[in-house]
Structures are given as structure tokens and as C-alpha cells.
Amino acid sequence: MDYFEQQKKKKKVIGWAVVVTLTLVIILTRSLFTVGAGEVGVIFDPLGGGVQVAEAQEGLNVKPPYASVAKYNTKTQDYTMSAVAEEGTLKTGDRVKTVTSEGLYVGLDITVLYRIDPSRADELRSNIGLEGEYQQIVVRPAIRSTIREVISNHEASDIYGEGRATVEVEIYDRLVSMLQVRNIYVEQVLLREVELPAQLTTSIEAKKQAEQEALRMQYVLEKEILEKERKLIEADGIAGANEIIAGSLSREYLSWYWIDNLQNHESVVYMVPSEGGIPLFKDIDSAMGSDKDSTTDTGIGSDTDSDAGGDTDSDAASSTESLD
């Protein structure tokens, strides 16, 4: 009988040990939690006053087993509003459409970079909402309202052209003042794309093209002015050289220069007077040869010359006899 009672007591002890062990495991499982890199945890303790002011930091943390933890991203995040569904935070077309100061409708794609204050995450949970909720409750409406307010003070050309950076700065300044009071810090505002009315886009492009054409003509004009100056300098140099050359020329040099260049022309026959008065001909043999060739080609000319030669010889003979 004692044996059976001992066995029964032993089983009770084992049973209680199992229950206690399971309870401890459950309590530890519910009490221990980890916070990832770039996150903070906000503990809500229903028996300890609700949201706890002290945020749980990165790593292993302990909480009451009945308390819950909400984790918040403390890294830089982006909120994008775009006409392309896959690009935006909302997976639908979310481009902001608003009116400019001249009454034209424009569409803007925008990205806002922001982060929360890690030490004030408990206020986000108490006053706004959980991670993923406060973006829709605070961030998105602030962006839309700010864009409409700023764009209404500008013309469409300011947004499209050089004033785009100014518009970004104005949107940034207004968002900072609106979100910082809610412990959300705006880091940067990016206007990604601006959609203008088709007619305005055409007129702006035409204006830009005209400006480029004016710049091109100005460049051509400046180039021509420089070319004119170059030619004037060149002409001045040539005139100066000619004056120097003219001052050094003499009649004897010009005569020598003319005679020296005649040797380069075979068609020129020239005569230089000598002491005996005998003319000296350039290339006289080739000149005579060409005359003979021309005479041979015309038979009538040959006969006439031979007759003339016969008459001349007979006249010379008769003159000789008369002298005798």
C-alpha cells in the first residue's frame, strides 16, 4: 500500500513540475522580445498605465507577459506619390493634381524622405497610430495640402523651369513646420515629374527652341566678328610686307626677275643684244623644226617657196652678169 501511495505522490510531483515548467516557458516566451536594427519598441501595459514612456531599444528586452509591443521604424523612409502605381506608397495612381496661380491644372509626382524621433515613438502610438497607420493619418495629408498651397502661388513655368528648386524648398519648409510638431522629421523633398497641359508644354518647348536659336546666332555673329578681325590683321600684315618689298625693288632687279622667269615658258622667244648685234634665241632649233613640219604638211606652200627660190636665183645671176 505504501508503494502505491509513493508512486501516486511521485506522479503528482512530476505533473506539477511539468505544469510549472510549461508555465515558466510561456511566461518567458511572452516576456522576452527582440527589437531589430533601426527600430524601437513601444510597450503597452494594461496594468501599468498603458503606453510606457521608455522605448525598448535594439536587442533583447523584457516586458510583462500580458503587455504588447509595437515596433516603429526609425530609419529614413520615403513617401512617394506617383501616377505609376508600382512606384507609389499606395499601390494605385496617386499623383497630386492641383492648380497654378494662372488657373492651369498640373500634376506632380513627389517623394518625401522622412524619419521619426526614436525617443518620441511612444507619443506616435498614444496620439496618432501604429507603424503604417501614422503615414496615412499625418504624412500623406500634409504632403497633399502643402503641394496645393505652394503651387497655387506659382506659375506653371516656375515649376517646369529654373524655379523648380525654389518650389521644392518652399514645400520642404512648410512640411518641416507641419510634421516636426508631430515628431516626424522631413529630410528632403523631391519633385520627380511635372505634368503640364499639352498646349503649355508646346509653347514652353517653342520658347526654349527660340532661345537656343538666338544663342546659336549670337555665337555665329561673334565668330564672324573674330574672323573679320583676323582678316584685317592679315591684310594689315600683307600691306606692310608689300610696302617693305616695294621699297627694296629697283628697275634692274625687276628686269632681271622678268628675264629669269621667261625661261619657264617655252612659247616665248626672246632676243638679247650682244656686242656684234647678233640675236640670241631661246630654243631656236625646236622652233625651226616646228616651222618645217608645218611647211611639209601644206604642199602648196612648198611649191610656191621653190618657185620663189628659182626666180630669186635667176635674178641674182642676171644681176651678176650685168655687173661683169
Image: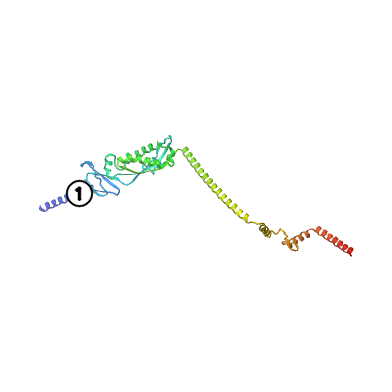
Q: Residue 15, position in %: x, y?
A: 17, 50
Foreground pick, 163 / 50: 163
Q: Quadrant of residue 82?
A: top left
Foreground pick, 168 / 12: 168
Name, please, the residue furthest toward the top.
Answer: 103
Q: Residue 224, position in %: x, y?
A: 55, 47
Is residue 57 toward the left or the right of residue 324 in the image? left
Residue at mark 1? 24
Q: Is residue 238 above or below residue 107?
A: below
Is residue 13 toward the left or the right of residue 283 in the image? left
Q: Residue at x 12, y 52 (%)?
A: 6
Is residue 53 toward the left or the right of residue 239 in the image? left
Name, please, the residue furthest toward the bottom.
Answer: 324
Identified by mark 1, the residue type is Leu
Q: Residue 267, position in %: x, y?
A: 71, 58
Q: Residue 230, position in %: x, y?
A: 55, 50
